[in-house]
């Protein structure tokens, strides 16, 4: 017997898929993920405040003279311009974020632009990037990952600013690295309103939505598994 897709069992399918995916990280449960970025496999020192992770999709509205409404055309998503403000401090005998910044993280930022003199305390990741032509760096932060921002180039490195009470900051501007690919076009109309569908159309609509959801969920779970296997072990080793 073929089961019928209904709003109730579709919502159950959504809930089940969410449970299989596991708990979603939040700033409350995993603050370390939000308080730092991981750049080329290296966790940033101090606290990182991330902004500018918006995703714009490049929609344009073309209005025809003498007509109501307009034609919406997507010209392609632009590049994100994330900014990170790093807060650094030193507690004698406990932590020295300035040393980590000067000896590891700052050379890493510069390594994407030019050769960096290798130092005994410089990590192998920095040495591996040193001397290469300008190149992008992999980046991870939950807010950036949510909008698909995974690779960046360093656009600007600010000076170290004294914030008072032993706290200093440095602002770094990034530009998303995402090679161009064909995109855009004028979308078709949305689906027929639910109230105007007959029972057969409603069942077909739910079946299509359910299949689309399950396919996207599989892709998301695969990406999450790849990240857990490749990125998170490095993060926890450095935390």
Image: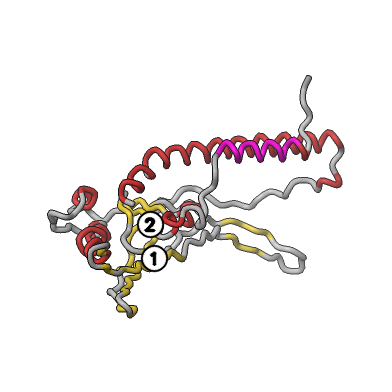
Helix, strand or loop status at disc 1: strand
Mark 2 closeness class: few <14, some 14–19, many ≥20 residues within 10 Å: many
Helix, strand or loop status at disc 2: loop
Mark 1 closeness class: few <14, some 14–19, many ≥20 residues within 10 Å: many
Is residue 20 part of the magenta span, yes or no?
A: yes
Q: Seen in the image, is 31 located left or right of residue 167?
A: right
Query: Which image quadrant for residue 154?
Result: bottom left
Q: Position of residue 164 (x, y in %)?
A: 33, 80
Q: Residue at 25% x, 64% y: name it.
A: 96
Q: Dots 1 and 2: beta carbons under 8 Å?
A: yes
Residue 37, label in figure = 2
Q: Seen in the image, is 201 located left or right of residue 207?
A: right
Observer-nearest residue: 36 or 147? 36
* 2 is higher (above) or lower (below) than 177: above
Quadrant showing the N terminus: top right
Q: Which residues are magenta?
A: 9-21
Q: Residue at 23% x, 63% y: name it.
A: 93
Residue under pointer 1: 84
- Residue 132 appears in the picture as rendered: no
Q: Seen in the image, is 238 located left or right of residue 50?
A: left
Q: Residue lying furthest front in this view?
A: 93
Observer-nearest residue: 49 or 51? 49
Residue 173, label in figure = none
């Amino acid at each position: 017997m073929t089961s019928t897709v209904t709003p109730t069992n579709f919502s159950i399918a959504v809930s089940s898929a969410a449970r299989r995916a596991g708990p979603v990280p939040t700033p409350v449960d995993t603050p370390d993920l939000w308080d730092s970025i991981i750049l080329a496999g290296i966790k940033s020192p101090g606290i990182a405040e991330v902004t500018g992770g918006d995703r714009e999709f490049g929609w344009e509205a073309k209005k025809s003279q003498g007509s109501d409404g307009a034609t919406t055309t997507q010209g392609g998503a632009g590049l994100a311009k994330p900014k990170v403000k790093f807060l650094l401090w030193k507690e004698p005998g406990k932590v020295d974020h300035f040393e980590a910044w000067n000896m590891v993280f700052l050379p890493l930022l510069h390594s994407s632009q030019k050769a960096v003199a290798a130092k005994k305390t410089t990590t192998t990741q920095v040495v591996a990037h040193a001397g290469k032509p300008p190149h992008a760096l992999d980046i991870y932060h939950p807010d950036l990952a949510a909008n698909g921002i995974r690779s960046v180039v360093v656009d600007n490195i600010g000076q170290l600013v004294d914030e008072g009470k032993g706290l200093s900051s440095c602002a770094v501007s990034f530009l998303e690295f995402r090679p161009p690919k064909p995109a855009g076009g004028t979308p078709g109309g949305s689906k027929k309103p639910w109230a105007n569908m007959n029972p057969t159309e409603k069942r077909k609509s739910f079946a299509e939505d359910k299949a689309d959801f399950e396919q996207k969920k599989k892709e998301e779970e695969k990406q999450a598994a790849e990240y857990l296997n490749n990125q998170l072990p490095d993060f926890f080793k450095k935390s």
